[in-house]
Image (cartoon, grey):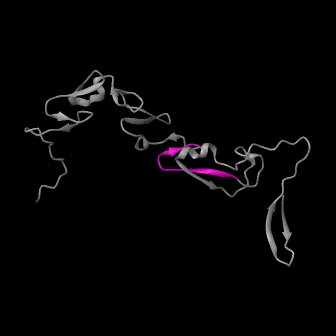
Amino acid sequence: MTLRRRAGVGGWLGTCLVLVFVAGWAVPDPAEAGLFCPNACSGRGTCEFEGVFNRERKGWPWSRVCRCDPGWTSADCSLCASSDVCPGRQVCRFGECRCRTGWQGDDCERCYSSRGCGEHGKCYEEACVCDPGWTGMDCDVPLEAGGALAPAADADDGG
């Protein structure tokens, strides 16, 4: 219930929220009531005032919701929606960033099969050993005959 209280000299002091406690009524959890965003939006979104009456949140006349950053989804922005947000050798699978096929470890830093080393390398003792003429963590960077990096395919040739 909202009440307006008159200031001493005229004018309005503001709108006050009055909570009425009745014996036997339970006060809802603030997070359930929509006073806070779930899980602080997992650090992947902003907590914003929705500004509408939300019956699902115990009938409180306000609610806060997460507006997820691009690539994240769910009520608390905890699920990936795109592999673009997953770091390194990870891809988004079933809402979680997981290691690409052929990689393992906390940061997907160790290969476990040659599939992780692409077409130009083999996995040996959890590291990629590149074929001659190739380099890079995934053996996907070509070398020129002298051992220097080959120019990128889209590099400007000066013409």
Instruction: State the quadrant of the C terminus.
Output: bottom left
Give the image location of residue 140, x and y in percent.
23, 36
Residue 7 in the magenta stretch? The answer is: no
Give the image location of residue 150, x and y in percent.
14, 43
Give the image location of residue 2, x and y in percent.
82, 61
Nearer-the-camera pick, 16 or 97: 16
* Region in magenta: 63-74
Image-based side of 90 in relation to 69, left or right: left
Residue 68 in the magenta stretch? The answer is: yes
Which residue is at 84% across, 67% downward? 4
Give the image location of residue 47, x and y in percent.
60, 52
Residue found farthest to the bottom: 9
Residue found farthest to the top: 125
Residue found farthest to the right: 23
Which residue is at 11% across, 58% downward? 158
Reply above or below: 50 against 58. below
Reply above or below: 91 against 45. above
Image-based side of 19 in relation to 121, left or right: right
Which residue is at 87% across, 52% downward? 20
Which residue is at 35% across, 31% downward? 109
Image-based side of 1 in relation to 35, left or right: right
Residue found farthest to the front: 8
Reply above or below: 108 against 7. above
Image-based side of 18 in relation to 52, left or right: right
